[in-house]
Amino acid sequence: MAHIIPFEDRLRKQKEGALSKEKKQRSDSFRMVMQCTACPHKCAKCGSQLEAPQTQILPEGLPLKLCPGCWEEYRLFQALVSGRSPTEGREYYHNQSWLGIWKSWLEYQRNLQEYRQSEEFSRLVEELSK
């Protein structure tokens, strides 16, 4: 009888294994999202492959890599936000909604940057690297 594994212990161990597997899957997918949003080989805005990646520090203090097209769009966004109304490069779709998209995207990038610099994120990366 001493060699028989109690049913409750076996059930508990199976449940713990399933939970740890689920936690690993969630943390792996989270890690991939965080890595992909900071990929040095693609444009942070549109995701296109960069020929020669160059980090551009945006005035918002965000170290982002942008393709030439997105960089021009960003410069136009900055001009419009600062009150200038350039006609060169401005298209019909550069409206208030377009400005809102850029503002939201920049806020999202700020939040990602802040989170990547947090103690909790560092701890998570350390745990995942084990």
Image: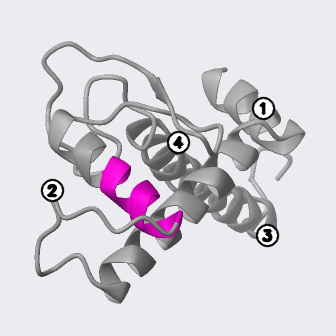
Vertical placement of residue 49 versus 97, above or below: above
Q: Amino acid at mark 3?
A: Glu
**Per the image, is 81 magenta?**
yes
Label 2, label 1: how far apart the Cα atoms are: 44 Å
Q: Which residue is mark 3?
A: 8
| Marked residue nearer the N-terminal end (2 or 1) | 2
* Circle nearer the N terminus (1, 4): 4
Task: Nearest to the eye among marks 3 and 2: give it.
Answer: 2
Q: Earlier in the sequence, mark 3 or mark 2?
A: 3
Between marks 3 and 4, how big is the CA–CA gap? 34 Å
Point out the tag, 3 or 4, that comes first from the N-terminus: 3
- In the rendered image, which residue does mark 4 sit on? 31
Q: Residue at x 11, y 71 (%)?
A: 91
**What numbered label is drawn on residue 122?**
1
The answer to which of marks 4 and 2 sits earlier in the sequence is: 4
Q: Dot 2: what SS?
A: loop
| SS at badge 1 | helix
Kind of residue sitting beneath label 4? Arg
Disc 2 packing (10 Å; few <14; some 14–19; many ≥20) = few
Please tell me whether mark 3 or mark 1 is closer to you in this view.
1
Highlighted range, magenta: 74-82
